[in-house]
Amino acid sequence: MRILWTLPYLPWPTTSGCKTRQYHLLRELAGRGHRITLLVQSKVPLGDAAREALEPLLERLIVLPRRAVHSPLNLLASPIIDYPMRAIINGLAPCLRHRFEQLLDEPWDVIQIEHSYSFQPFEKALQARGLPYMLSEHTLESVMGAASHDRLPLWLRPLNAFDRWRYRRWEQRVLRQPSELVAVSPHDAELIGQISGRPVNVVVNGVDCEHYQAVHPALHSQRLLFVGNFEYGANLEAIEWALEDILPQVWQSNPAVRLAIAGHALPASWKLHWNDPRIEWVGYRPDLRELQRRSALFFAPLRYAGGSKVKILEAMAAGLPVITTSKGVSGLAANRGEHYLASDDSGQLALLVTQLLNQPARMAQLGEAGRAFARQRHDWSVAAQQLENVHMRLGQLAPASTPPLGGVLAK
């Protein structure tokens, strides 16, 4: 099939769950013979590494620059009631709109838009031409804005609440328009369905199970591992909760426990604030396997839900036992006690960590059960098949003038 795929960021390097998802779905679909044009508006220039990673997967890679967040246009447009701030930052882009309109002159089997906040430059052209398309929404921004609300200065909180209200209006407007809607979990599909009044497909988040198959954790190491993108408020809050409340309770029982914190945009101030040799400030690692091999378990005290957690799936695929919260496994059809352990109470989480570190047989059992769950339910091949099913339906809605390019899929 011939696919026009739009993104508001470059999916390489895979510094976040969203980028990881995009890269692996592109790789899977390209491997199945689909011809993909990727149209990207990016805040960073296209570098050699990204070009080398992406171009072999694509028929065309088109990257347009996104203006800076603090540009005068964004500041001037910020009071507009119709657009939330993320839609302003990623929208009001004449060059992107014009390039998209040019591409619509070509025949496509599938037009795929990622994220409602990127939709503004495409809305009028899609409405005017009446073309079928799909929109993939990874999480409801009107809900996720709550993750950073309490972290803001008091004077900014009313503005954040106003923007969340704008985003709910935006979601109600945008999510009712596509021919097909996609969510990343059944929970998110239910929420999106309530807003849109439409059926919503699920294309799960995934993991490259083969990549992690040879990892065997160091179950006696007493090392906990957390991985996250720290541009995301929920990950910041999780680490602060862990270091302020949970880990001090763990250390009372077992002073030898260590916590390794890895991920993109790790705040430099944290090293000074929590100056403890038992905290390992790892930062971003493009390959997590060596870090996973040196860890005993994956600890993710997340208190905000949305989407499903790629970092949890990567830990499971590597055989790491997982201790998390109910929010940490939101979107995953895993069983507590069988595939992971969880609590939403800081004292109980500390007790789970302390007890599990003293039970290597139980750790191995949890790790292998999690690995099997990830392989069966969340390998990227599973997600790619789900996405292909959506593409098939869209291909059947394509205008009659579109050449029949679906033969590769039929094979």
Image: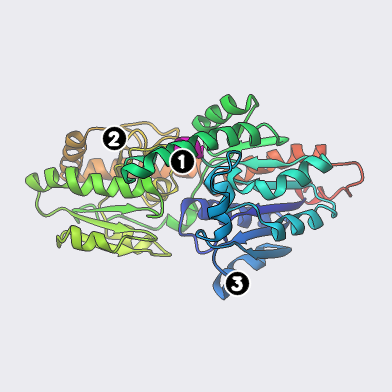
Q: Residues within 10 Å of mark 1 (few under 14, many from 20)?
A: many
The answer to whether the residues at label 1 and label 3 have Cβ atoms under 8 Å apart is no
N-terminal of the two: label 2 or label 1?
Answer: 1
Mark number, residue 52: 3
Residue on which disc 2 sits: 342
The main secondary structure of the magenta stretch is helix
Range drawn in magenta: 140-145
Q: Position of residue 67 (x, y in %)?
A: 58, 62
Between residues 25 and 120, which one lies in front from this camera angle? 120
Residue that numbered label 1 is attached to: 308
Kindly identify the residue that appears in the image at 61 percent across and 57 percent down.
27
Query: Which image quadrant for residue 394?
Result: top right
The kind of secondary structure element at disc 2 is: strand
- Whether residue 298 is visible here, answered yes or no, is no
The answer to whether any part of residue 49 appears in the image is yes
Which amino acid, mark 3?
A: Glu
Residue at 58%, 67% (x, y): give it: 53
Q: Residues within 10 Å of mark 3 (few under 14, many from 20)?
A: few
Question: CB under 8 Å between callouts 3 and 2?
Answer: no
Magenta residue check for 161: no
Instruction: Tell me, yes or no, whether the highlighted magenta stretch contains residue 143.
Output: yes
Distance between the Cα atoms at labels 3 and 2?
A: 40 Å
Q: Earlier in the sequence, mark 3 or mark 2?
A: 3
* Real-space CA distance between mark 1 and mark 3, rounded to the nearest whole angstrom: 28 Å
Q: Nearer the viewer, residue 218 or 4?
A: 4
Circle 2: residue type: Ala
